[in-house]
Amino acid sequence: MTESTAEPSERWRILAVLATGTLLAMAPWLTGAAVAPALRVEWALSSSQLPLLTVAVQLGFAAGAITLAALGAPDVLPARRLFLWGALLAAMTNMAFAFLARDLASGLVLRFATGASLAAVYPVAMKLTVGWFRAERGLAVGVLIGALTVGTALPYLFTGLGALAGSDWRLVVAAASPIAVVGGLLVAARTRPGPFDVPAPRFSPRLALAALREPAVRLANLGYLGHMWELYAMWAWIPLFLAASFTAAGAPSSGATSSAFVVIATGAIGCVAAGALADRFGRTTLTIGAMAISGLSAVAAGWLFGASPLLVVAVCLIWGVSIVADSAQFSSAVTELAPPGTAGSALSLQVALGFTLTGVTILGVGALALDDASAWRSAFTLLAIGPAVGIVAMWRLRGRPEAVRMASGRR
């Protein structure tokens, strides 16, 4: 191996900076969901209106990701500078949500803007990461997604601490903004493109559709959609589920949001472990296993509603670890299966479809009038449909001849 192709010695330091910066910059993502109980009272929101604040972020991210890819922004602007601007805009729109939003309409606009801003954070961090790793890339991506998972959970930690301190919901939301700024500044100051960096291809509907004509790519996308069907709905509703379950068990509900933070944040363990194992055991093996565990955990959590809080949290921890463990593998599969020159557009379309779909399930769970055990059982059984479909898709992909192109022949 020559010096020009050797793995760079500073890659782990760069990954540590990228992971830390991403963790901090993603803090504004779920601030609306984290303060949902307070907003329900202050803005007189119905159970069907409440999840719209989270859906707006999801749709904003999807629109932002497609727009940036279509413009080729990661190649027009230096990636670390684009990351910084995304973090700064997310911080500003989140702060505006905290202190300027007065009703659902204004809140939705600002939440959409926050999601669109964060489209310049996570995808750009991913691009920077893979530019530093060729060997152990799966582990590196797992670490990055693990950091994203913890960052997404931070608003629940802020809410739990704010409840203990008696803070207003606006201060809880605002706390995420300076943290996001620090994340953006850290990445801008302490990272640079790696030796394996490649241009980010612009989004082309024609190329994306060309990739989707391949049955193997369609199956990988279907697996991803099954994964996304469950993921963000669980992240959005788990604090309310835990609070209701604790109350039904006769326990104080004050620790529900802090427990939700732990449940979501432990997903980082699954991300890192899966990243290390996927290239060894195969993409379909890992995704099928992770979705089987997460789907069963969803059903089990619903049926344990009102049981001992320790038991409910234990099952939800298993759910939290498994639900995001397979996240990176669907994207990796598309890059390996798509025809040459189409992978970038196929991935942009995959992300847009996936985040749009999350809005359907977030609203679907909220429409079930979550006021008793049977409603929560129905809601979480609904979420388990996604992993079931994803398992079937990945099993079928496993049997196709093209599957040997994944993970160096490990299906």
Image (cartoon, rainbow, N blue to C red):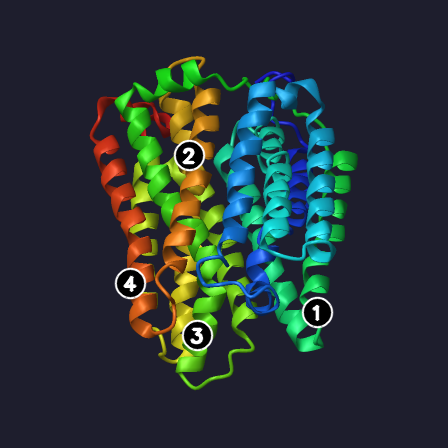
Q: Position of residue 17 (x, y in %)?
A: 69, 41
Question: Sequence order check: which comes first, mark 3 or mark 2?
Answer: 3
Q: Which mark is residue 168?
A: 1
Question: Sequence order check: which comes first, mark 2 or mark 4?
Answer: 2
Position above or below: 142 against 258? above
Residue that carries the numbered disc 3 in the rendered image: 244
Dot 3 and dot 1 residues touching (CB under 8 Å) = no
Q: Position of residue 91 (x, y in %)?
A: 72, 46
Mark pair 3, 2: CA separation: 31 Å
Residue that carries the numbered disc 4 in the rendered image: 378
Q: Is residue 326 visible?
A: no
Q: Label 1: how many residues lie within 10 Å, few (<14), some (14-19) or many (20+)?
A: few
What residue type is disc 3 on? Ala
Mark pair 3, 1: CA separation: 22 Å
Left of 319 or right of it: where is 15? right
What residue type is disc 4 on? Ser
Position above or below: 316 against 404? below
Q: Residue at x 34, y 55 (%)?
A: 294
Q: Which mark is residue 353?
A: 2
Q: Label 2: how many residues lie within 10 Å, few (<14), some (14-19) or many (20+)?
A: some
Mark pair 1, 2: CA separation: 36 Å
Mark pair 1, 4: CA separation: 33 Å
Position above or below: 232 against 221? below
